[in-house]
Amino acid sequence: MEKSLNNLKDKHNISRPSPFFSRLGRLFHSYKSISGLGPLTIRSVVGLLLLLYLILGPIRESTDIVSAALTYSLLLVLAITTAAVLIQGAILKRNLDLSIMPPDEPAISGEPSRLMLTLSRARIVPFLFLEVIIEFEQTGVTAAVARVSGFSGEERRAHIDAIFPHRGSWEIRGARCSLRDVSGLARYSWEAPQPTAITVTPPPCRDSTLPIISSTQRPGELVVDIFNKQGEPFDIKSYHPSDGVKKIVWKAFAKRGELLSRHPEASMTPEGFVVIFVIADNEGDSACAHALAYARSLSPLNLDIIGGCEGGASRTPAHSAESLLELLVDSVWDSSTSTESSLKADATALIAHCGQLTPGISVNKLLIFTSAERVSDPQHARAIEGFAHWLSAQGIVPVFFLTKTLDLGNVNTDAALSRLSRLIMAPAVERAPRVSATTYNAFLTACLNRQWEVHA
């Protein structure tokens, strides 16, 4: 931790763009075109206004035959196109059989996940096409759009790639279908309900190299390793030919006339539970990935795992890496508005579960997994530090496991060219606001002063 402090001492605060340019940029990026008027698109509305001008202006005043023929021809084309789209759309809405199949394996946050779209009886006349967009109950999913055309009654399948911003159980509300013409003059839209859910897990993490730290201590007589007998050969049992002659207790044979043999007693281990607490909201998938890798590294050692997380007070704590993954996925929607008091409530439920599981044993250390970005935010850093103070007052030593620091350096974003580029073009991927290294540095200093372990 001292090395991390020394590396960050020469870092400076990150200057942020002025509020005026930020608001103006958001205004440009969030602007959406007018959807149109009923079945007519914005293109049709503009065309109708132009045709209305020609009818009330040049055609009426000068009786221009060419303008009149062109105007009425365009009106006829618009009317025929709109009627065809409305009739075809009503038929498709009644006859179309649409189904959405989620991927067989759980999706990974931040990576494309492929969904299967199946369409039956999708007979579409020429010059029209069907546009299908998958809608989710939660916002933030980036999904591709499927387009279907052609007059065929056979079953059709299309792949739609979706990118989920974070872990969780993402619920699909259904599909929004929109029949359009190739010229973009008219449309007919409806919703096809298809309730289903997609499980999204944090990205995989490499094998954990973090130290194994026990949260409790149990007397040796309470923990008996029956699979690894390496103690002194004091246990005596009836002789078996496979035991060999050297293990026979001859004195007992001389007194009782019964063959007995010595065997190693069961070895004792003083380790207890490894209690894991993950502080990760919907932007903390990296901390979840490290906690899962750490829990999987404990499985070959036959250590007992008890895991909890932010927002998991009302849920059963995990006892394995697999159940911890389910807990992290299920509780993500309850972790976005957590505070110091909610962290205390979540940890209290976890510690109480440990006491109920093995009465008479108290938790001495709590392994806390969180991200460096989380403790770099001033508000979250104060909440976590207050939570750690509360643990220390309860006689529990907090042990922090932080992910690697990201973008905590000196970055200048006030250049005029950078401002102009943000106004004209939105970034391809929305990034979380970066913060100064000052808060992160202060958090490490507080941990060092209070002798709290920090592993990164």
Image (spheres, rainbow, N blue to C red):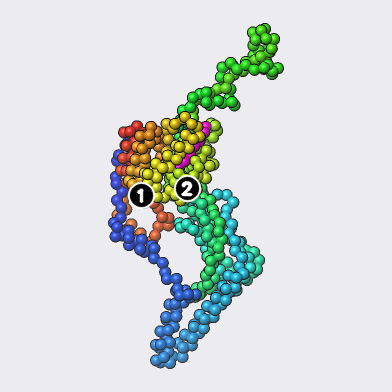
Q: Secondary structure at mark 1?
A: loop
**Quadrant occupied by the C terminus:** top left
Residue 282 is situated, as x and y percent measured from the top left of the image, at 44, 49
The mark nearer the N terminus, 1 or 2, is: 2
- Of 386 and 187, which appears nearest the observer? 386
- Of 378 and 194, which appears nearest the observer? 194
Q: Which residue is mark 1?
A: 434
- Residue flagged by tag 1: what amino acid is it? Arg
- Of 297 and 75, which appears nearest the observer? 297
The residue at 35%/59% (across/down) is 422
Q: Which residue is mark 2?
A: 331
Callout 1–callout 2 Cβ contact below 8 Å:
no
- Residue flagged by tag 2: what amino acid is it? Ser
Q: Secondary structure at mark 2?
A: loop
Distance in Å between CA atoms under marks 1 and 2: 25 Å
Q: Which residues are magenta?
A: 303-309
Q: Residues within 10 Å of mark 2 (few under 14, many from 20)?
A: many
Q: Is residue 32 visible?
A: yes
Instruction: Nearest to the eye among marks 1 and 2: give it.
Output: 2
The quadrant holding residue 131 is bottom right
The quadrant holding residue 429 is bottom left
Q: Is residue 291 visible?
A: no
Residue 447 is situated, as x and y percent measured from the top left of the image, at 34, 36
Number of marks present in the image shown:
2
Residue 94 is situated, as x and y percent measured from the top left of the image, at 60, 70
In-image side of 34 versus 198 (left or right): left
The residue at 39%/60% (across/down) is 426
